[in-house]
Image (tube, coloured by chain):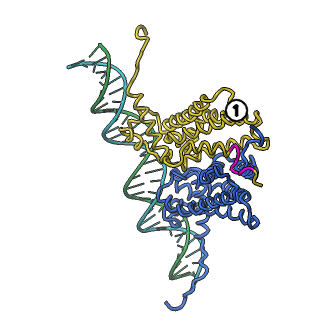
Chain colours: A yellow, B blue, C cyan, D green
DNA sequence: GTTAGAATCTAATAGGCATTAGAAAAATAA
DNA sequence: TTATTTTTCTAATGCCTATTAGATTCTAAC
């Protein structure tokens, strides 16, 4: 209780190993799903035995929670980056495009973490679901605010329910991770068509 | 090898039990996912022991395959019903509405079977996935044809990719099963807004 | 080189799982 | 009733699982 009050540089190997474990866990969870992913497989992908994993994470659940937290943060951050690229006083159309671009980029470019979030939506223990709820809710609120902006600006038609619209867009985006294969259409192509169709519809003007 | 050539009425209890088992399996699979659904739970929901299940189904995989086959057939049939309600020479817009109504009705009104299909998309053994592929493909082809009709009629804009459009709509519909709670918005409300937004967009005419 | 702590491994626990073979029971037919 | 077939149960198989405690090895500071 005297000297050595300051303990600096606890840069341990531990932290790096944690990163590797989380990455491998995301990989395995996203491909196999929570239940059928085994700690043995995750550990061995990180070059260690299953038991050693418990030095870094208290349980499989805790590991999953951390993967999912990172996933949500990553999506949220990517959206924020896109928003920051806009000028101030951006109109709703630009904001929508930025949200779509951010969410889709995050999902499709780093699928390990984000696919874990999307695929394991309902199949994860309730305790995990509960732990994630606040962050999930916070991100969803941003989308709600976006729709409110659209209504406030008078861009979104009055007879379009903005809650449903939000769920339409997000469903469309999330489902992309189910079918998207890199090498096909570019993400930009998706973003532009999604924005265009949601704003203007697929129908040619002047028809009927 | 003489008389008794005709064996009629093999109406056994077996067939009814199979039905019950399939229904309960759909319920459990849809809620827990393939891997974490246990045959013990399915069997006990049908009032029997896990071992007895093997009198009716050769394996867990076979059981899952049959559930999924029924699910696809159910969705496909429901869509077909909606199409039959239309007059002959229906325009693309009506067909789109019928497809959306059929698919969504099937998904949301009988969620046990259909949610199994949607939730377990990537988390099921490859053998199961392979067994289902033909029926899945056949149903998807109907949607492709719908989009081709829209293009042929000149209703869908030239700069809208019809493959992407199909994936947008289906993603939007399928994702509904993730968030939809009976008691909220009616299915008809969803159908109408989905059709409207995909055809016309959410943007008010004349803005900008 | 000694020592302390960090990181990993070994080996065991306890439990769940799908699956199977044969006994038992239930339903049906004679 | 008896005989036969259909259906279910029992009990065991072997395998895989998450988790734990303690021994072991590795790392870094002195």
Residue B147 pos. (x, y %): 64, 57
Q: Is B112 part of what is drawn in magenta?
A: no
> Viewed as shown, does residue B88 lie left or right of A186?
right
Is residue B174 visible to us here? no
| Quarter of the image that includes the C terminus of chain B | top right
Q: Chain of mark 1?
A: A
Which portion, as a residue range, is magenta?
A198-205
At x 46% / y 45%, what residue is drawn?
A37
At x 76% / y 66%, what residue is drawn?
B87
Q: Secondary structure under badge 1?
A: loop
Residue B126 pos. (x, y %): 47, 56
- Please give the count of numbered marks on the rendered protein: 1
Q: Residue furthest top?
A: A2
At x 62% / y 68%, what residue is drawn?
B16
> Viewed as shown, does residue B56 lie left or right of B73?
left
Residue B18 pos. (x, y %): 58, 66
**Eyeballing the image, is A133 above or below A37?**
above
Q: Residue furthest bottom?
A: B2
- Seen from the viewer's position, the closer of residues B17 and A144 is A144
Q: Main secondary structure of the magenta part?
A: loop
Residue underneath mark 1: A91
**Eyeballing the image, is A126 above or below B192?**
above
At x 46% / y 34%, what residue is drawn?
A58
> Viewed as shown, does residue A61 lie left or right of B45?
left
- Seen from the viewer's position, the closer of residues B78 and A197 is A197
Q: Residue furthest right?
A: A158
Label 1: few (<14), some or many (≥20) within 10 Å?
Answer: some
Is residue A112 visible to us here? yes
**Eyeballing the image, is A44 above or below B171?**
above
Residue C17 pos. (x, y %): 48, 53
**Eyeballing the image, is B64 above or below C24?**
above
Q: Is A199 part of what is drawn in magenta?
A: yes
């Amino acid at each position: 209780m005297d000297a050595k009050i300051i303990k600096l540089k606890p840069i341990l190997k531990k932290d790096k190993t944690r990163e590797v474990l989380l990455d491998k866990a995301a990989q395995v969870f996203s491909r196999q799903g929570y239940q059928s992913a085994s700690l043995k497989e995750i550990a061995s992908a990180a070059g260690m035995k299953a038991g050693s994993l418990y030095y870094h994470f208290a349980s499989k659940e805790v590991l999953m929670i951390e993967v999912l937290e990172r996933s949500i943060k990553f999506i949220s951050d990517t959206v924020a980056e896109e928003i920051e690229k806009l000028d101030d006083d951006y109109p709703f159309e630009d904001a929508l495009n930025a949200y779509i671009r951010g969410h889709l980029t995050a999902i499709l470019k780093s699928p390990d973490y984000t696919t874990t979030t999307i695929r394991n939506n309902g199949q994860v223990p309730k305790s995990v679901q509960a732990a994630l709820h606040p962050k999930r809710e916070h991100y969803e609120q941003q989308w709600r605010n976006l729709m409110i902006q659209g209504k406030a600006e008078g861009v979104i038609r009055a007879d379009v329910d903005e809650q449903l619209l939000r769920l339409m867009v997000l469903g469309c985006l999330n489902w992309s991770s189910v079918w998207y294969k890199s090498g096909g259409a570019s993400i930009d192509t998706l973003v532009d068509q999604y924005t265009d169709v949601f704003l203007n519809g697929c129908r040619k003007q002047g028809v009927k």
